[in-house]
Image: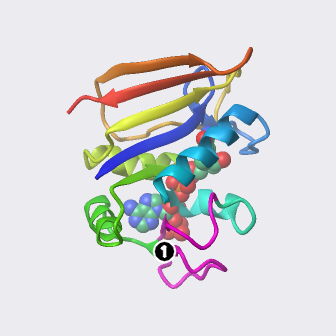
Amino acid sequence: MKISVYLALSVNGMISNQKGVPDWLSGEYVQGFMSTSQQTKAVIMGKTTYNILAPDNLPFKDEGTIVVLTHDTSAKSSQSNVIFTDQDPRAIVALLESRGHTEAVIIGGTLTVSGFMKAGMVDDLHLIVEPFLFDGGLPLIKDAGDYKLALVDVKKLSDRTVGLQYRVLK
Ligand SMILES: NC(=O)c1ccc[n+]([C@@H]2O[C@H](COP(=O)([O-])OP(=O)(O)OC[C@H]3O[C@@H](n4cnc5c(N)ncnc54)[C@H](OP(=O)(O)O)[C@@H]3O)[C@@H](O)[C@H]2O)c1
C-alpha cells in the first residue's frame, strides 16, 4: 500500500501555531486536501485532528474509509465509514488493504505523522508551504528520528503558496 502525508506547513516547518487556530490555511491547501482524500478514499488522522474536522468538514461522507487513531476505541461517529482504532501502523495498513484500498493519505497531526514515519510506513510527503513563521506550535514530526528525502516536485500554487512533494528514502 502507498501511504502519503498531506499537510500545510509554515515556512519554519510548523503544522499549527501556538493558538492552534487553523486560520492560516490557504484555499490551495483545502482544495488539495479534498482532492487527495477523494482520490485515495482512505484517510488516516489522529483524534485531535478528527475533533477539529468532525462532523461537517470530514473529507468524504459515506464512502471509503476514515481511520482515526485514539485510545478511546468506543468513540462514536455520525458517519459509518469512520473507524476508531488504537492499532499500530502495520495493523492499520492491513485493515485498509482488507477493505480494498491500495493507497491512503495521512492528514495530521504531529503524533499521527510521527507514528507512521517511525514505523517506516510513509512513502510520500505532500507539503503545502504557507507564508508564515510560527514561534511555537507543533512541528511536522516530533521524537520520530531523522529522514532523508528525495525531491519529486515543486509547484507554485499561487502568489503565496508552494506545493512540495518528496519521496521518503528507505
Ligand atoms: N497544517 C495541517 O495541515 C494540519 C492538518 C491536521 C492537523 N493539524 C494540526 O495538528 C494539531 C493536532 O496534532 P496532534 O499531534 O496534537 O494530534 P493528532 O495526531 O491529530 O491526534 C493525536 C491523538 O490521536 C490519538 N493517537 C495518536 N497516536 C496514537 C496511537 N499510536 N495509538 C492510539 N491513539 C493515538 C490520541 O488520541 P486520544 O487522546 O483520543 O487517545 C492522540 O491524543 C492541531 O493543532 C491541528 O490544527 C494541522
Q: Residues within 10 Å of mark 1 (few under 14, many from 20)?
A: many
Q: Position of residue 150 (x, y in %)?
A: 32, 21
Q: Is residue 73 magenta?
A: yes
Q: Would you identify the image quadrant in which residue 28 lies?
A: top right
Which quarter holds ligand 1? bottom right
Seen as rendered, the residue at the extreme left is: 170
| In the rendered image, the vertical position of residue 24 relative to residue 150, given as above or below | below
Q: In the image, is 44 to the left or to the right of 94?
A: right
Residue 108 showing in the rendered view = no
Foreground of the two, 29 or 39: 39
Foreground of the two, 108 or 39: 39
Magenta segment, which residues? 59-82
Q: In the image, is 14 to the left or to the right of 56?
A: left
Q: Is mark 1 within 8 Å of ligand 1?
A: no
Q: Which residue is label 1 attached to?
A: 84
Main SS, magenta region, reads loop
| In the rendered image, the vertical position of residue 124 relative to residue 101, given as above or below | above
Q: Position of residue 72 (x, y in %)?
A: 50, 78
Q: Would you identify the image quadrant in which residue 57 lies?
A: bottom right
**Residue at horizontal 52 percent and vertical 59 percent from the top:** 46
